[in-house]
Image (cartoon, rainbow, N blue to C red):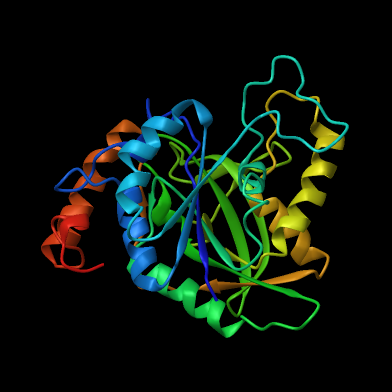
Amino acid sequence: MKPTLLVLAAGMGSRYGGLKQMDPMGPNGETVLDYSVYDAIRAGFTRVVFIIREEFASDFKTKMGDKFADKIEVHYCYQDLNDLPNNFTLPNGRTKPWGTSHAILAARHIIDSHFAVINADDFYGRDSFKQIISYFKKNENNTSDTDKYCMVGYKLKNTLSEFGDVNRGICKENNNLLITVEEHTQILIEKDGICRGQNLAGNRVELSPTAIASMNFWGFSGTLMGHLEEHFTEFLKNHGTELTSECYIPTVVDNLLTNGKAECNILETTSSWFGVTYPQDKEACVKSIKTLVESEEYPSDLWNCAHT
């Protein structure tokens, strides 16, 4: 088995104010993405695929991808608004990306086996990658009609930003099996102390702070790509003329669970998640990485250390 790490790195960082996937956070200018790739290599991933935008491809390859080239197999795929199934065209005025499902589909021509999906700007921790690899090994030879997926889950309260709202996939589970997952937007603790977010129906709903949240750290088999193409085509039939609707990966997973085509294990991890959504989040992120380096979880100079 040669598992692939697929990194969603095409975001423009509208709330952050720049390309946070290339913003230095570590003691020697390391980005959050540097630590994710480092952890992936340590865990046993043999290939990384970056989903990026073509307009900043040269800069990304020079500043990011080139430093990994002698340590892991590196590929790039471009998320393009015009990359649509036959008979669909981009509506006039559409500038917003089609969502995480469409981003993953950008790699459909080069991924046909086990792969994990992460966000470029989220710090997931070493143990999280180890848990994904362990799950892949256990289910490498799955012969059932049900696809075996997994996700690393985190408590919602530990994934919020004190500086503004966030988007999360809110999960319901039973004995570590994912039952349903629904993308919620504009999640934050409101003035009355209650955590609320907007569901896909557009309703403002209360959310439990201890609910399991998906941070887009998924483990999939190669069969997901076919399911994604079907779901995205259906999405375009219903929403393809809209200018802001997005096709989210949690929605696809939820559909597959509901129809009995897949099961998804929620993996427990000893690692802590942290990330940057707003510029003010950077200070806490830098401090967290500093603490991990001081505890010798990571070397102080990540890519010039004697080992990976």
Please state, as top left, top right, bottom left or bottom right, where the N terminus lies in the image.
bottom right
* 233 relative to 197 in the view: left or right: right
* 87 relative to 162 in the view: left or right: right
Residue 4: x and y in percent read 52, 62
Residue pushed farthest front?
70
Residue 39: x and y in percent read 34, 64
Question: Which of the 4 quarters of the picture holds residue 70?
Answer: bottom left
Q: How many marks?
A: 0
Q: Is residue 150 above or below residue 16?
A: below
Residue drawn at x 58%, y 52% is: 169
Question: Which of the 4 quarters of the picture holds residue 245?
Answer: top right
Residue drawn at x 33%, y 60% is: 71
Which residue is nearer to you in this view: 218 or 191? 218
Q: Is residue 55 visible?
A: yes
Residue 258: x and y in percent read 79, 64
Please state, as top left, top right, bottom left or bottom right, where the C terminus lies in the image.
bottom left
Which residue is nearer to you in this view: 136 or 289? 136
Residue drawn at x 67%, y 47% is: 105
Residue pushed farthest top?
93
Residue 162: x and y in percent read 35, 40
* 301 relative to 122 in the view: left or right: left
Q: Is residue 67 above or below residue 82?
A: below
Residue drawn at x 41%, y 31% is: 58
Question: Which of the 4 quarters of the picture holds residue 282?
Answer: top left
Q: Is residue 271 visible?
A: no
* 21 relative to 287 in the view: left or right: right
